Image (cartoon, rainbow, N blue to C red):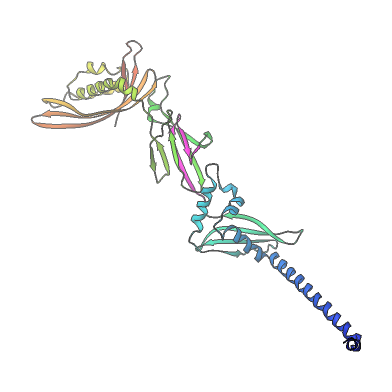
Amino acid sequence: MKNKLKNVPGFYFILFAVFAVLFIALIISSAFLNSFLSNYEISLPSSKAENMFKTYFASNDYDALYGALPAMVTGLETKQHFNEYIKSLTENKTVVYREIAIGSVDNLKKYTVIADNKQIAWFTLNLSPESGKWTPGEIQLTAAADNSATVIAQTSDKVYVNGVLLDDGYIAETVETDSCRHMPDGAEGIILKKYTVSGLLAEPSVNVTGIDGVEKKLDYNADKKEYTAEITYDNNLEEKYRDIVISAAQTYSKYMTQDASLAEVANHFYTDTDTYKNIRTTTVHFYTAHSGYDFKNVETSEFYGYDGNTFSARIKYDYEVYKSGNTKTYNCNFVLYFKKSADSGQFKVYYMAID
């Protein structure tokens, strides 16, 4: 055997060694080329765009998109609101992206993101002048976060949107109620504050609590997206002054049917006011004679104290007047404003609104 190997020319050993070296070099070159081509492909804008799309839009994990768009979430909302918003834009929809032509700009590429033929976002790639590589640029949602709400509440109320207490920075304006026009010197009518929030990702949850900490009922106007909190009235005042309110209102009604005198009206109304003057100058002596009258369904409400000497209240009732077996019914609805007399200490009406 050794003799046979000795007979093999050295040329073949050299040739075998050359082939072995070339084979090894080919393997190394192939690996290097694959790596180079892979890196080259990754560096292409089309590959970068595909990666951005998959990272931010093609999965159900919105953490990356949330991290790229922190300004989308106001202090009144949370990451959960953001996730629900994106989910509403993409769930059960075909989401794709396409490059947008932006003219002769060599270092920028822009792509639109479409969900069921509706654009929801766009993103860009920037060509780095230092490395010559395409890098992620800007991401922007085009589906507007346009939910909003207006809340009208008393100055003493606390207004919460999505559980967050609104500060005065959200107050768009103050609103004077009708009571403000009828206040005597030194008293302040009911003033409301109008809060406005906008740019929300979802319909907000709105709550209002009164000065007593109790949550208030809200009236919602869907067309205006406006919540109005009920006004807090004083039940204690109703217990104290209900009889005064009923007596004043019913005396007025009886005067209008000639069942009470003007002097009796003056016992309940200040005589130096426009309200009393209007009553006094109203023609009542032509009212048809009748056999009797009665007050039905008497309701008092909305007692509100402006200070220790001034309050208002609403009263409703049906005033029935009888004549010849027939009944004439007057549906009465008044808001009476009372002020305590400095002389007698008696509460009298200084203004009456007829609804």
Q: Residue furthest front?
A: 1
x and y percentages locating residue 304 in the rendered image:
36, 25
Q: Which of these two is toward me, 227 or 29?
A: 29
Reply above or below: 315 against 207: above
Kindly tell me whether residue 267 is visible in this rendering. Answer: yes
x and y percentages locating residue 345 in the rendered image:
33, 12
The N terminus is located in which quarter?
bottom right
Q: Is residue 153 left or right of residue 3?
A: left
Q: Which of these two is toward me, 30 or 53?
A: 30
Q: Quadrant of residue 130?
A: bottom right
Reply above or below: 339 against 76: above
Q: Quadrant of residue 39?
A: bottom right
Residue for point 75% across, 71% down:
31
Q: Residue furthest top?
A: 343
Query: Which residues are the magenta region?
Result: 144-165
Asked if residue 126 is among those painted magenta in the image, a careful observer would answer: no
The C terminus is located in which quarter?
top left
Reply above or below: 294 against 29: above
Residue for point 38% across, 34% down:
230
Q: What predominant SS class does the magenta segment belong to?
A: strand
Kindly tell me whether residue 102 is visible in this rendering. Answer: no
x and y percentages locating residue 60 in the rendered image:
54, 57
Residue for point 41% across, 28% down:
190
Q: Quadrant of residue 291?
A: top left
Q: Which of these two is toward me, 73 or 148?
A: 73
Q: Is residue 72 left or right of residue 224?
A: right
Reply above or below: 58 against 159: below
